[in-house]
Amino acid sequence: MAQSPFVTIRRDLHQIPELGFKEHKTQEYILQYIHTLPKERLEVKTWKTGVLVKVKGKTGQRTIGYRADMDGLPIEEQTGLPFRSSRPGMMHACGHDVHMSIALGVLTHFVHHPIDPDLLFLFQPAEEGPGGAEPMIASEEMKEWMPDEIYALHVAPEYPAGTIATKPGLLFANTSELFIDLTGKGGHAAFPHETKDMVVAAAHLITQLQTVVSRNINPLDSAVVTIGKLTGGTVQNIIAETARIEGTIRTLSAESMQKVKKRIEALVQGIEMGFECTAAIDYGCNYYQVDNDPAVTERFISFMKSQEDIELVVCKEAMTGEDFGYMLKEIPGLMFWLGVGSDYGLHHAKMNPDEKAIEAGIQAVSKYFQSLSF
């Protein structure tokens, strides 16, 4: 059996991962492919390193949007695949190469098989950071082509290839990065009384941060404060003048996010007083929750359940973050998981999606959009 052209596309894209707003080769690849398609019903725009493609429908009385993210991650690939990343220290470890190949497959189908509504395909940069969805939806290019509904998928390594999982309402959490810089006074290890040790201050702060969720958030609610990185000091016999804490915050409501941040700020102020130092907090990228429109989602679930070749799971919400939430904040629509059956999870250096999911995703989305025709 011949390999799907969209598996080939996925492998090509997998080899050229690029970080947020630096997806120049990726944009070039997408544009080159689109230019091979019949042009009579296509309109193409670029925005930063992203691409917007409108496929004109038979009537064009409404527009259905479909978004695929483009960027990779700063991860050194360890899959050993023959088409592994050609970029040292970068990898498509979150499946965006799969997302783009599916989007191009659906786009290609409707170029040749028009339906009543217009279709708008958004290839969005910088999902992993600093965040491309919010500025993209506010752009003049997007405003001119604003869809009436919008859809997106995200690969799910834990589900078998081709399985679709989603739910009405909240699907993904509110997320925020967390960076805390502490500055004290360095000095020789033999004279600690003349210093303000920021390794000790950081250690106390990290311990205190573990109480934010356990003692400040309703146990019937959900939140996560994770510290993933601590740096401080230079050598073993010099007391550290600075330390940096890096982590992430995730909550199932916008209100809890504000509560968590307020508590973190109070604890940091206490560290400043207790250790006679200064501190600065940076929340980096903040992503709004992915909140699926109930009516759109029930229609989507009902359709997928009616298809004998599709396994549909009504799942629970997850603490993952996705900037597609900013699009759903403005436009009714939904995101769903697409199973890719990988032994290794998202953002892992050995994440290897089952490529059978690509054609399964193309078929499922194409059939669904066909059902939205008048």
Image: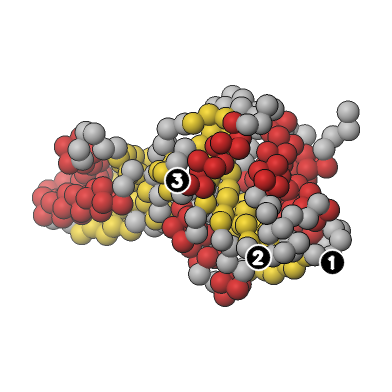
Q: Image check: 348 left or right of 8?
A: left
Q: Is residue 187 visible?
A: no
For the residue pair 88 and 295, the one nearer the viewer reads as 295
Q: Is residue 300 left or right of residue 106?
A: left
- Residue 165 visible in the displayed image: yes
Say if mark 1 contacts mark 2, CB within 8 Å: no
Q: Are marks 1 and 3 in contact (CB under 8 Å)?
A: no
The residue sitting at the front extreme is 374
- 60 in relation to 251, above or below: below
Q: Is residue 321 above or below residue 284?
A: above
Q: Which residue is mark 2?
A: 61
Q: Amino acid at mark 1?
A: Glu
- In the rendered image, residue 193, in percent from the top left (x then y), is placed at 12, 48
x, y (%) of residue 35? 83, 62
Tell me the distance, in whole angstroms, between the alpha carbons under discs 2 and 3: 23 Å
Q: Nearer the viewer, residue 119 or 281?
A: 119
Instruction: Using a 10 Å C-alpha cutoff, classify the residue at mark 2 as few (fewer than 14 neighbours), some (14 to 19) or many (20 or more).
Output: few
Q: Residue furthest right?
A: 2
- The answer to which image quadrant residue 302 occupies is top right
Q: Position of residue 235 (x, y in %)?
A: 35, 44
Q: Please tell me which residue is depicted at 63% across the width and 63% down the height of the picture.
A: 62
Mark found first going from the N terminus, 2 or 3: 2
Q: Which residue is mark 3?
A: 294
Q: Which mark is residue 352?
A: none
Q: Secondary structure at mark 2?
A: loop
Numbered mark located on residue 40 in the image: 1
Kindly state the secondary structure of the residue where label 3 is placed.
helix
Kind of residue at badge 2: Gln
Q: Mark 1: few, some, or many residues within 10 Å (few <14, many ≥20)? A: few
* Residue shown at 49% from the left, 31% from the top: 314
